[in-house]
Every structure is written in C-alpha cells, then in structure tokens.
C-alpha cells in the first residue's frame, strides 16, 4: 500500500476502507508518511469530505494511536462532557459536583486553555492547593468513593491527532467537519468514556460561527459516537455572547459557587441543567430528560451539590473554605467600573472580543508558555436584551495594572447599545441518534 494511492483515491471522491485509514494513521504516528503527503491528503478530505464510516474509522484509529485510559474499574456508566469552546464557559465546574451529587460517576479529564481565558484545569488551580494532576489509580479511587474527580489529561492520548492538528493549522484545513469531529471524538474515546455529551457552541465566540455548520458537526459527532459504541447526545448552544457573567479564572470559580448556591446567572444555570440532564439519562439514572432535570434541581436547591463541590475540593488537596470565603483565591489590585455612555438596550456583545479583553488583563494565554493571572478578568452586568441607563455600570474590570484604557476601549467597541432587541435563544437544538 502506498500513500499516493490513498491521496489519488480520495481526490477522485471514492470512499477509503478501514485498512487504508489504519495504514494512514499508523504512518502518520510513526513518521513514515512525510508531511507533504499528509498535507495533500488533508486537502483532499477538505474538498471531498468523508462518509460516516470513514470518519468513524479515522476516529478509532487516532484514539488507538496512543494511550487508551481504562476506566472499567469505576462502578457505573461513565459519561464524559465536551464543549467545542466559548467565552465564560464555567459549566464543567458546576456540572461535575451537581451530577455526582445524585450518584452518577463523573470521571472528568479536562484541558488547559490557550486563548481568552484558562481552561477548566487552569480555573481549578485558582483554588489554593487544588491538585489537577492525579495518578490514574488515585483518580479512579476518588470517583469510586466520592463519584467525582477532575484531572488534567494524562498520558499520550491520541498522538496522531496532535500531529494531524499541527499540520491542519498550517495548511488551512482546520475547519473541515470530518477532521474536527474525528479530532474531538478520538480524545473522548481514548479517555475511557462509556457515553458522551457534547456542547456544540455557535456564534461569535464559538468555532462554528453559524447554526448550519454547528448542526452538521453535532450530527456527525453523534453518529460517530454511536458507530463507535458510545451512547452520544449533543446540545447546540448559543455563544454569540459570553455564557454567564464572569470571564476570568478565580471570578469564574466564584460564579460556579454562586450557581451551586442557586444564585448564579440564569443562562449558565439553564445550560448546566440541559447538559446535566443528558448526562443523567445516558448514565441510566433517569428515563427522561424531564425526570433527570428534576433530580438535578432538587440536588442544587437542597445544597447537596454545593457540599459535593466542597468534598471534591478537599479530596483533591484544595481548601474547601474558599466556598464560603472566595477571597482566599486572591483578589485583583484594581476594581474598575466601565460605565454606559448612553441609555437603551444591549443589542450585541461580541463574545470573542470580550474574551480577548480578559486575555489582555492576563486571564488567558497567547502562547502555551504564558503564565495566567488567576485574579484578573471582567464581569458583565448587562447581557443582550437588557435595558441600561447612561452612567450605569456595564462591566467590572478586575486588573493588576492601573491603566486599562486598552481594555476599556475594546469593551466599549464590542458592546452595542441601541433599540430594544430580544434575548438570544440559549439552546438552539438537541441532537440525538
């Protein structure tokens, strides 16, 4: 078998066999297929697309190209949740203890952030002492004993995907749905999940800017998951504006605590219930989404979920006292109010640019080597569809530098005030098999 034959076959629009795709992934992983042929192959996929069977074969081959985490010793059905990304996405920090508090095992492997703000792991590190790197045996022990643990992605998961992504990034083939879907799902499958819930975001702050692309990606990943033997569901959610109010690290932990206390932003709370209900159904703890939601609402309102969060923090070496005293995570030196320049209705909040403003303060990374300042960020006081009066606070800026004129200007430029507009629809679609 020769790589050039696969390139020619795919260029002609023909379907590749599992054997041919396995040959490609093996050569990609061990370096026997040169980058120029891999790049040519990526471009043929970009233009000729792939069938569900091809994408599934590519996903499984990449998942098996490195370590595959064995979570079989954890009791119950393990459900993983993945978001395609956004701004102010604090859902995992609320979801993990909430779902675990009703007895569903949550063995969550999360990543660090590169961009607007930190990833889930960076945010949890804002909690003093919290250990995000757990040995596999400790990780499994905690989930069996306490139903929940969150750790950084360990081992060499899907190395073929890492190599492929690096080449996609420099060959203008990143935004190919078969390649995006196989990249995400290969890591989820290698992480040992029995079932997968996907949050596919769409809008300005998301990778998929329009609903059509988001729908196709969600439907593709659900089909891949099912073909790979994993029960899979997806939510297509709005990311035209940030989710919740906080964009930062420690301030997002505070927002997660407030949500677990029943005092969080309405959109974040709703997103947690929607995703959590799917996790509970896939884990077999409820027959319907309505029944699952009822269990989650009771767990949050009774305080069980908040207690589970404290337990999770303590189990992973952190100080659970931050739940009652969040100032223990540290506070920014300067708190600056950004005041509205006019009265009206908030018509638009450009999510991506608001995230960049937080990054300029130090809440995110431009490169992998950058250090994150956990205490900085921005908090929105008005969301799309809300009325605002001239001189009223629009945003609170938390900074460790006195001059934040660049951040102020970016915020003013990307929050539009004008005539009345309806609030955006948070959940656009639910996708199942």
Image (cartoon, rainbow, N blue to C red):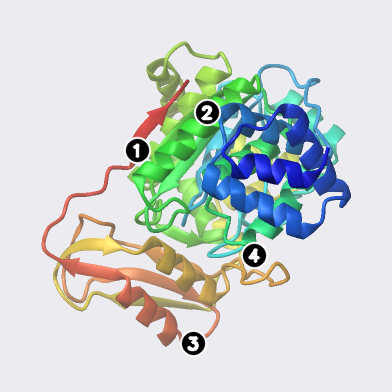
Decide: is 310 above or below 300. below
Q: CA distance from mark 1 to mark 4?
A: 33 Å
Q: Which residue is mark 4?
A: 170
Q: Secondary structure at mark 3?
A: loop
Mark closer to the chain start, 1 or 4 = 4
Horizontal placement of 217 versus 13: left or right? left
Mark closer to the chain start, 4 or 2 = 4
Q: CA distance from mark 3 to mark 1?
A: 39 Å
Q: Position of residue 425 (x, y in %)?
A: 28, 43
Q: Which residue is mark 2?
A: 222
* 177 or 77: nearer the viewer: 177
Q: Which residue is mark 1?
A: 427
Residue located at (37% from left, 37% from top) = 270
Q: Which residue appears farthest toward the top when viewing the image? A: 287
Determine contact: label 3, label 1, CB under 8 Å: no
Horizontal placement of 30 versus 284: left or right? right
Mark closer to the chain start, 2 or 1 = 2
Q: For the residue carrying disc 4, how many other residues have a C-alpha within 10 Å: few (<14), some (14-19), or many (20+)?
A: few
Q: Secondary structure at mark 4?
A: helix
Q: CA distance from mark 2 to mark 1?
A: 17 Å
């Amino acid at each position: 078998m020769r790589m050039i034959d696969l390139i020619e076959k795919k260029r002609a629009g023909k379907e590749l066999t599992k054997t041919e795709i396995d040959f490609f992934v093996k050569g990609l992983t061990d370096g026997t297929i040169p980058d120029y042929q891999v790049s040519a192959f990526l471009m043929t996929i970009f233009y000729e697309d792939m069938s569900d069977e091809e994408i599934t074969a590519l996903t499984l081959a990449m998942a098996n190209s490195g370590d595959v985490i064995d979570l079989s010793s954890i009791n119950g059905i393990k459900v993983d949740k993945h978001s395609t990304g956004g701004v102010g996405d604090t859902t995992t920090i609320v979801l993990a203890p909430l779902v675990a508090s009703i007895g569903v095992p949550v063995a969550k492997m999360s990543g660090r952030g590169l961009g607007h703000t930190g990833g889930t792991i960076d945010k949890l590190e804002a909690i003093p002492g919290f250990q995000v790197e757990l040995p596999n045996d400790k990780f499994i022990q905690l989930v069996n004993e306490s139903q929940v643990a969150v750790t950084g992605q360990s081992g060499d998961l899907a190395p073929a995907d890492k190599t492929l992504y690096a080449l996609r990034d420099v060959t203008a083939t990143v935004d190919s749905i078969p390649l995006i879907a196989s990249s995400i799902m290969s890591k989820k499958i290698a992480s040992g999940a029995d079932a997968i819930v996907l949050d596919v975001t769409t809008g300005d702050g998301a990778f998929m800017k329009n609903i059509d692309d988001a729908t196709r990606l969600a439907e593709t990943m659900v089909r891949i998951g099912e073909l790979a033997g994993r029960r899979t569901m997806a939510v297509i959610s709005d990311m035209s504006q940030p989710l919740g109010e906080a964009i930062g690290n420690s301030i997002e932990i505070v927002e997660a605590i407030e949500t677990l206390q029943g005092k969080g932003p309405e959109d974040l709370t709703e997103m947690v219930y929607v995703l959590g209900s799917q996790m509970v159904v896939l884990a077999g703890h409820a027959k319907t989404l309505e029944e699952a939601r009822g269990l989650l609402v009771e767990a949050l309102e009774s305080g069980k979920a908040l207690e589970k969060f404290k337990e999770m923090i303590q189990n992973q070496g952190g100080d659970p006292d931050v739940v009652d005293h969040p100032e223990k995570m540290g506070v920014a030196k300067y708190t600056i109010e950004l005041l509205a320049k006019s009265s009206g209705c908030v018509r638009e909040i450009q999510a991506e640019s608001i995230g960049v403003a937080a990054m300029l303060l130090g809440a995110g990374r431009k490169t992998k080597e950058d250090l994150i300042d956990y205490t900085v960020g921005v908090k929105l006081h008005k969301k799309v569809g809300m009325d605002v009066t001239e001189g009223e606070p629009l945003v609170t800026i938390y900074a460790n530098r006195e001059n934040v004129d660049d951040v102020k200007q970016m915020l003013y430029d990307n929050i539009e005030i004008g005539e009345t507009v309806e609030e955006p629809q948070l959940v656009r679609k639910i996708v199942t098999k």
